[in-house]
Structures are given as structure tokens and as C-alpha cells.
Image (cartoon, rainbow, N blue to C red):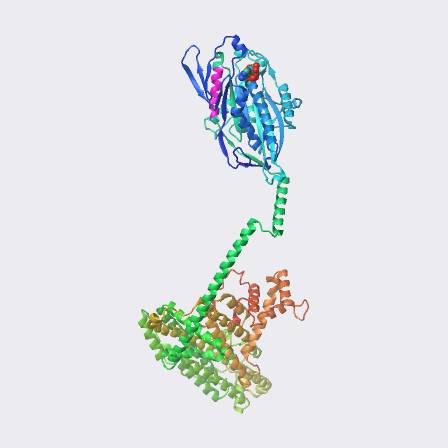
Amino acid sequence: MGEPKTPLSKILTTTSSCTPGGTKVREEKIMVMVRVRPLSSREQAMYDLIALECPDEETVVFKNPNDERPCSSFTFDKVFSSTCVTARVYEGGAKDVALSALTGINATIFAYGQTSSGKTFTMRGITEYAIEDIYQYMQNHPERNFSVKMSALEIYNETVVDLLNRSSGPLRLLDDPEKGTIVEKQVEEVVKDSQHLKHLIGICEAQRQVGETALNDKSSRSHQIVRLTIESRLKENAGRLKSFIASLNLVDLAGSERASQTKSAGLRLREGSHINRSLLTLTQVIRKLGSGKRTGHIPYRESKLTRILQSSLGGNARTAIICTLSPALSHVEQSRNTLLFATSAKEVTNTTRVNVVVTDQQLVKHLQQEVSRLEAELKSPEPSSSSAALKALLIEKNVKIQKLERKMGELKRQRDLAQSQLELERTRKEKKESSNSSPSNQVRKCLAYPLDTIASKFASETQERYQAGRQSMLRQSVTSTDPSLLVQEIRKLEVLQRRLGDEANKALDILQKEVACNRLGTQDAAENVAKLLSEIKNMQIINSISEDIMVKDKADLKEEIIRLNSQGQTIESLEKKLENVQNSVDRLVFTLGNNEDTPDTKTQSKRKKGIPFNLTNSPNMSNFIRAPCSPLSSSRRVMDEIGNTMSDSQSALPTNDSLPNSCKSTPLKGDQVGYSHSSRENTPARQKSNSVNVKKMKKMFNNTLEETARNIRSYVTELKERVAKLQYQKQLLVCQVLDLEAGEATTSSHGEPDQSPFSWLSMFEEQRKQIVMLWHLCHVSLVHRTQFFLLFRGDPADQIYMEVELRRLTWLEQHLSDLGNASPALLSDEPASYVSSSIKALKQERENLAKRVSSRLTPEEREALYRKWDIPPEGKQRRRLQLVNKLWTDPHSLQHVQESADIVAKLVGFCESGEQLKREMFELNFKSPCDKKTWMGWNLISNLLHL
Ligand SMILES: Nc1ncnc2c1ncn2[C@@H]1O[C@H](COP(=O)(O)OP(=O)(O)OP(=O)(O)O)[C@@H](O)[C@H]1O
């Protein structure tokens, strides 16, 4: 016996009341009914007295016939007196439980009582009525398909026997993890109809162990369990999925008995002993369950009866117990025990659920139906209720979107109107201010310098917007900047400015030393350099400024402005002086070229065996090499060719007093700047043998000299760039301070800052276009372009970075134009050393990037890119180089720029490295190029990334 044969994995235990489709778990007590039979003919013959009365349908009372007073009373769900027929017992409670099996709830009905109390009599009637009702129910539910199976067993002397197949012998009980206790090899007959079922039950009765005792001619000597397994499935066209499966156990127990009463002996006595033992276990199980100790040990396994009935006792089943009693006084003790058992059983709670079955076939069919339904819905021009609701929702959303769009249009219109009014106001104000010569006006005028330069390259309208946007930016910046920070920033810039002067001074010191040592040609050259040196020294007039100042309030700001203004055009002057330096260097080179073949030079060239421009002792050597505009590689190459054998006489050096301070502190050593003459060098033989070498060396010297001069020029150019940036930043700050002052006076009248996010964004777009174009024109590193492009996307915080980048590039572009127009005599045979080195660096960068295509992109990604960028499978160059060569080549197309940036970012690994790109890497402040963390020039960024 045991659980249903249907695999448990397909049984979804849900909850239910009595109706299919119910969903709740229900806890319910075991239904306990008491039935008192009439006195049997045997009892009547013995003149036995009636000791039980049933005053109502729920109470049974013991009474001593010899005493009028009632002894004790018991109440139960139902009490049926001796006059009640079995049909009433069935209808009174058993029916409800029995029919639960039709709705997926396991059910058990069993009779308990002493021998000959009427258990078999009652259960036989209950089974018949149940069968009738079950089949009646099936008839009344044509929408469902039912299947009924039946099995039956008896437990006789603790042996399980299949009543439908007695020949199978004793059956074993097995523990199944899913189903609980099952009976091995038990036959389960499919029941065709009610008659078939009755027939089968008849067979079981015939097979059951029955024996004659003193109390019962046909005493059942075994416990009998008939199991009906009913599966109920909704028919396919019903459109619902649920199927149920449940068992109805109809149990007729053997009766408890006293050997003295049954006068058992031998076999009957042994039977009685087994019966009593299993009933005792049942009693213990019920008592424990009834006392609420469900979590403690329940001795189900101590008898086969309780093992098999385990799910019906405190488990997933509705259970009804009918306790049968003999009313005879002679059986009072037995009846009392039965009532005590019944009382315990009343307290046992079961948990019932509906066992839902979903077969694979059902599931597939259901899904197919669902798919068909959805397909039909999609094809159908008539919208279903759900799609109609969606459509309505969509229309509603569209209306809302249209409303919002209209509102946005109106807002944009208002914004444009306000902007144009502001522009007008500003222009008017600026015109008015232009008549004044206030310091702030001067600053603004000064700030406009690079814009004037590029004005010819960009539309005038764009420039106006640019100017307007920048002014807005400044005002916005002012409102958000702490005045004390501004002053400190100015101080920082001044410190940098001073360092810059130092640096230039040192460079010129070196130049002067070379001239003083007569390495650089004529007296004119020496004079030129001396002049340069004094010019550079003049640049350092700001040295006296104190670095440590405490800025307390805005009053200090005003002082600061006055101080800055009183300095006059310090930075401008520095710039002018650098220009002079540059011109002087040019003249120097020119002089050297003209004097190349003079006798004096010849004489000197005999003496000159040192490096023409020895930089090995220069503290700025690293700066020269690092500086973007000072490609010393070729110079070093020449030095290598010459070899390090030439030196000059230390005696030719100027006196220590005539040297600049830097030289005094670092005296030149003979092995660094020259070498001592050997006495043999001046012999005629030596002079003759050296004549060819001297000529060759002189030519090389002149070449090197020219290149050195170019290097100096480049370096000065770089200094100019740095000064220009410095000047810009300082003026920007001054302008902020001035605006802050002006803002204080006009805040109440002007109100909020006039820059809206819209105007900033349009300005950003314009600036970005300009920057992209300038990158292209100036051959700026692709990695730099990519980083900058991806990092600055229009955030208000990007304003200052955009401004500085534009300034740098504008300056560079202007510088390159100047180089392009410069005299070829000054630039040697190259159009511009910076341009050529930048182009070369860019080419190298592209080659390096191309090398990364294979490792950084998957074959699929590569193929997709080749297709997209029209890279033919065969060509002069490898496909990856062709691809990289196409990147960043169209500054007019934002899409091209965006896609180029994405590819370069992937090749370089910006996205994967985990290192977030930070704005700070694009330094606003200019510092010494020795500092690796600072701005190092566009093409050096990719070097840092080891490209
Ligand atoms: N309610 C009743 N009305 C009339 N007769 C009854 C009633 N109950 C039992 N009887 C009769 O009493 C006798 C004993 O009944 P039954 O065999 O059903 O008892 P039992 O409890 O099954 O006994 P055992 O445990 O020994 O099998 C039977 O002859 C039966 O017809």
C-alpha cells in the first residue's frame, strides 16, 4: 500500500478546501464518531444490561444500570446510537471525508473498537455508500476524466498480505524518500466501474482472515486496508490545467480483545496478541499526536499498521475514525478504553493539501495551446483586451510626450530670447567699457590676443559666441571661487614664473660659457650672448615677491590686484625679452655662418677640439631633452660621431668672477668641458697629420653648431609657450578677481549668472570642434586626442580645461605658422623642426598602435572594423596599419572622431586598465617639465604609455 504510485515529482502539493482548484493549506482535526450497536442476540441471551446512553448526537454516557446517577459522559463529533443505521453514520461525517479523494485530498476512514462491536458491519456499509457516491460524483462531473485504481491488503500477525494477490505471499514495506512507506509488489487493479469495484472488494473480503471466537462467529483476525486511488483530470477542451490525485483508505481494524472474554487459545490467542500489540501502538501514536507532541518521537514504526497509516495519522489526509461500541454492561471496560482512545484521537490534527498533477503531455499541450492563442492574437486585426489596453496606454503616453515637446519648444524659445537679450546687454556694456582704460579692461584686451589670431580661421559668429561663453564661464567661476584661493593661485603662478626665469637664465649661462670659451665663433657672437644674458636677468624682477602670504578677506584681493597692476607688464616684458633672445640666437647663427671661412675662424678651429656646445654639465640637460620643442637627438648623434675625445682648454674659460652665479657654485671641470693640451700636439708632424681630420671635424662642427643653435631656438620657443600659458592663467585669475569685485557691486541689479546649461553646451560644441581641428593641424598625439575627447564631454567643470587646451593649441598653431613663414636660413633645410618631429612622432605612434590591433581586438572585431573602414584585404600596407592610418584623419566629422577615439581607447586599454581618466592629468598650471606628473607636451603622453 503506501502512497500513490504516481511519481511524487509530478505531484505538486498545493492546498485546498474541498473544491478543485482550492489553494489553501488546511489543518483539521481527525473526525471522531462513535457508534453504539444494539445488544447482540448473544448479549441479550446473557441478560446483559445496557451501560451506555446517547443523550444527543454528540454525547455518549456511561451509566451503571444499578445506579441512577450517570457515571461519565464523552462528547465527539458525532455519536450514533444503536438505532442509527449505517447510512446515517455515512452521511453524518464519513461521506464528506470519503469524497475528498475526488478533489485531490487524501482521505482515510477507519473503524476502531473491541471485537464484535460492529467495525466490519459499519465499514462494509460505509464502503458501499462511498463507492456509490464516488461514482455518482464522477457522473456529475463530465468535464473531468477520472481513473480509479484499487489495492487491498491485510496485516495478519504482523504480516502484510496482498488481498488481490494472496499468492504473492508476505509483502515488504519499503521506505520511499518521496512517497513514504510503500508496499512492495502490491497489485493495483484499475477499476472499470462501481460493479467492478464491488466485485474486487468482495474478493478481498473472501480472502481476509476470519475466525470464530466466543464473541464473534466471524471475527476479523486481521487489519484490512482497502485503498482507492482516484485521479481526476480536467478534459482538454476545458482549457484548464489542473489534475488531482488522492487516495481513500477504508480501514477495518481487527478488534481488541481480552483472551478471557474471547476464550482464545492457541492460534486465536496468538492472533489476539498481535492484534492487541498493533492496536496498542496505534493507541500510543494517537495519544502522542493528540497530546500535541507532533515534533517528538511518534512510534509509527513500531507496527506495520501505523507505518502504513502514517500519512493518515497527523499527515496529509482527512481522517475519520468511527469508534464502535457494544452497549453491554459486560463490555464496559472495553468500551471505556475505546472511548479513551476516541478522546485522544479527537485532538489529532492533520494537514490537508490538494495533490495537483501536471503530466508532461498536459504541460506540452497547454503550452501549445497558449502559443496558438498568442499567435492568433498577434495575427488578429481585432485587438484582444490586453493589447487594446496597451494601445490605449501608448496613445496616452504619446499625448504626454507631445505635450512635453511643445512645452520644451516654448522653453527653448524663451531661453533663446533671453540669451539674445543678454548678448545685446553685454555688447552694450562692453562697448561702454571699451571707452574706459580700467585695469580689468586691459586684462580682457590682453586675454583676447590669441582669439584675434585665430579669428581668420573660424567664423566670426562662432568667435562671438565663444567670447560670450567664456565671459559667462568667468563669471560663473567667480561666483564659485573662494577669493583667498584665487590670490593663492596667483602666488603659485608667480613662483612658477620665477622658476621659468631661472631656467632661461641657466640656459643662457651655458651659452655664455661656450662663447667665453671661444667655442662659438666670433666676438660678435660673444657680445650677442652677453646681451642675451643681461636680457634674461632682467626677466627675473619678480624674485623679491614673498611666497607666504595670508589672505584673510576680500580687501587683500584688492591689494593683490593693485600689486599685480603695479608690476606693469612683467610677463609681457618677459615674453618680449624671450623674443629678443630668440632673435639674438638667430643672429648668432647667421654670424657664425658668415664667419665660417675667415682666417680667424680657421685659426680658432685649429684650437677648437671641444664639443661646440657642451651640455653635459648643464643642470638643464634633462629639460632640453624632455622639452617638446627641443629634439636634441640629432645633436647627440653628431656628438657621438665626433666622439668624446675633443675638449677645450680650461685656461680659455672666463674668470670665475665673470661667470653667472650658477657657474660659480658649480665650477667646470676639465674632463667635462675640455681637455689639457698635450705638448706633442703642436709639433709640425702632428699638425700635418691632423690637417685632413681638422677639416672634416670643422665641417661637422659647423653642422653641429647650426643644429645647436636651432635647439636653443626651439628651447626659447618652448619658454615662450610656457610664458604665454602662464600669462593666460594669471590673467584669467586677475579677471576673476576683477569680476568678483564688479559682481559685488552689481549682484543686486544683475541677479543670477547669465550662463545657462544650454549656452555652455553650445559653446562646448564649438570649442571641441576647434580643438579637434587644431589637433589635426598641429599633428598632436592620437592618444592625447583620445584621452581628451573621451574625458571632456560637456560637463560644466570641463570649461577651464577646454579653455586651456584651446589656448595651448592656438598658440602652437600660430607658432607653426610662424615657422612656416620663417627664413630658410634660420631653419636650415627643414621646414620646421617641430613640425617634422611631430609628424615623425605621430607616424611612430600610428605604427605602435597598429601593432596593438592584433592583441587588443578579437578577430571578429578586427574584421568588423576592416569592413566598416573600407580596408581592403590586400594592399601595400598591412590592414591593421591601414586602419590606424585612417583614424583621426577627418576633423570635420564628429562621428569619425568619436569612432576613432573609441578604437584608440580600446587599443591603448583606457577602458580595461581600471585607471580612471582624470581631468587632473591635463594640467592647468604649468610646471617644470622635469616633473613627470605635469604636462609634458602632446606627443609625450603616448611615450609614457609605452606606445
Ligand atoms: N449497528 C449494528 N446493527 C445491527 N447489527 C450489528 C451492528 N453492528 C454489528 N452488528 C452485528 O454484530 C456482529 C458483529 O459485528 P462485526 O463482525 O461487524 O464486529 P467486529 O467489530 O467486526 O468484530 P471483529 O473485530 O471480531 O471482527 C455481526 O453479526 C453484526 O451483524
Q: Is residue 360 above or below residue 202?
A: below
Secondary structure of the magenta portion, mostly? helix
Q: Is residue 334 magenta?
A: yes
Region rendered in magenta: 333-346
Q: Is residue 182 visible to us here?
A: no
Residue at 56% of width from left, 63% of height from top?
906
**Figure quadrant of the N terminus:** top right
Residue 612 in the magenta stretch? The answer is: no
Q: Residue furthest bottom?
A: 599
Residue at image position (61%, 18%) is 209
Q: Quadrant of the C terminus?
A: bottom right
Q: In which quadrant of the rendered view does residue 748 lie?
A: bottom left
Location of residue 270 in the rendering, given as x and y in whole percent from the top left corner: 57, 15
Compared to 713, does 190 lie above or below?
above
Residue at the extreme right: 874
Horizontal and vertical percent position of residue 460: 49, 78
Q: Nearer the viewer, residue 914 or 927?
A: 914
Name the side, left or right, on which 723 lies relative to 854: left
Residue placed furthest toward the top: 46
Q: Is residue 271 left or right of residue 668?
A: right
Does the rendering let one see residue 601?
yes
> In terms of depth relative to the viewer, which is nearer, 904 or 363?
363
Q: Tell me the quadrant of ligand 1.
A: top right
How far across and down, in percent of the image, does residue 57 sit?
Answer: 47, 21
